[in-house]
Image (cartoon, rainbow, N blue to C red):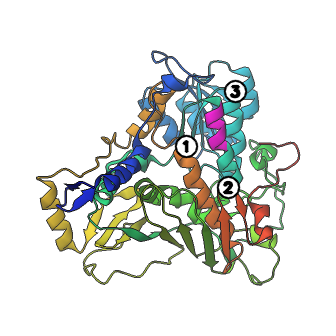
Amino acid sequence: MKKQKGITGKSISRRDFIGTAAAAAAFSVVPRHVLGGPGYTAPSATVNVAGIGVGGQGPSDLRNLKSAGANIVALCDVDQDFAARTYRDYPEAKVYVDYREMLEKQKDIDAVMIATPDHSHAVIAIAAMKAGKHVYCEKPLTRCVSEARALTEAARKYKVATQMGNWGHADKGIRLVCEWIWDGVIGEIREVHAWTNRPVWPQGVELTRPKETPPKPEGLNWDLWIGPAPMRPYHPNYLPAIWRGWADFGTGALGDMACHIWDPIFSALKLGYPTSVEGCCSSYYSGFFRQDFDSLAESFPRATVIRFEYPGHQGQPPVKLTWYDGGMMPARPADLEASRRMGDGDGGVLFVGSKGKLMCGCYGRSPSLIPTAKHVEYMAYLKDHEPKVKAPPYPGRNGHWVEFVEACKGGAPAGSNFDYAGPLTESVVMGNLSVRFSGRKLLWDGANMKVTNFEEANRFVHPEYREGWVL
């Protein structure tokens, strides 16, 4: 077979080149006019957006969507006091408490922005897509595997524009990580480490279910806040932000940050579904080692180390990915200079290749090669050469929301649409499933969403919803 020279001067076969080029396809797009369907919005039209969950992260997303050209026409929140400031920011927008009433009554809505607690993402997003609305949903996309798969399939079925709120996907760092890895500068990658400084909220042994039942604030609809989760009495220990540590409502440190931190890993290596997941963790509470799996569902552990195995995919070899949170960290590389930190203040990623190492911070920020001398040499090389596979131009942080608005108008799919964000979320929440059974290696059949070697674990793949709530 005829060989051609790669950018680094090595010979590569046509087969290798095509395999690497195929990896770049994750950034490629299909024009939305090809998709059409009930969610299609004419390119010339203004995109009318409704915000659902507008007291916490929601206001930031709304501001970004407005700056991207969207028109904010409706606001919905179960906590009227928490959302009051946002209501004042958009005095022309109609206000609702129940998203179902909003979707039924207000017909000028083209798209919804969802920034509620994790446990209600799926039911709201599915309802919106069934109504023909485009969906921007904060990360993580869902709380469990089956919900993520359902959202991915619903977006295809209803042909609506979608985007998950991992804005780093549109920024420069992730593009550079992909280009350098596809250029072969660190060789074949079979080992990756990712970590975060989270949780920065109470979790694990710090959380016990409150016994007190104080009166709820007058402006809070507690029944709607609970949504599909099992009912429990109101307590301020659950909201506004502490819900992240409670397993009925949030997804812990892994869910909060992995959709950001793993983004360059999934984009560069095209991981797909893992074949196994093995979690180990600090105690959830005193008496953790009781085999009472329902008790383990109360909160997430304070610290975890989770090991994922992925098969070779799109020309990439099998990969072992290890996640660390709660202060846990991978071993510091021997060739990383003492003056350099591991990642950044939010976390980081370490790619270990057959020819070197690449490290970046959260969102793919500040990628660099290890050691520094190798990085300097490669940067000098790139001044006169192009990487053999170029990622598309990065739109920058605000481009993340612009991508979504343009997709709603019939343009190309947004970069972190549900075809990409769904499988990424599935891996993330599989990690949370694994720590319920700390120390046990779970074998995973991704296509069928099933743990094949421990039936008890499958109870947590498909959640049971409270009566009156369905996906």
Image marks 1 and 2: residues in contact by CB distance under 8 Å: no
Q: Is residue 360 magenta?
A: no
Q: Which residue is mark 1?
A: 419
Locate the N terminus by quadrant: bottom left
- Above or below, comparing residue 107 to residue 127 in the picture: above
Q: Number of callouts in the render?
A: 3
Locate the C terminus by quadrant: top right
Earlier residue among tags 1 and 2: 2
Q: Which residue is mark 3?
A: 131
Task: Give the residue type that dot 2 points to.
Answer: Val
Earlier residue among tags 3 and 1: 3
Q: Which residue is mark 2?
A: 145
Magenta region: which residues?
151-157
- Displayed quadrant of residue 176: bottom left
Q: Position of residue 366 (x, y in %)?
A: 30, 60
Q: Secondary structure at mark 1?
A: helix
Q: Position of residue 460 (x, y in %)?
A: 75, 62
Q: In the figure, is residue 400 to the left or right of 119?
A: left
Judged by depth in the image, the label closer to the viewer, 3 or 1, is: 1
Q: In the figure, is residue 129 to the left or right of 324?
A: right
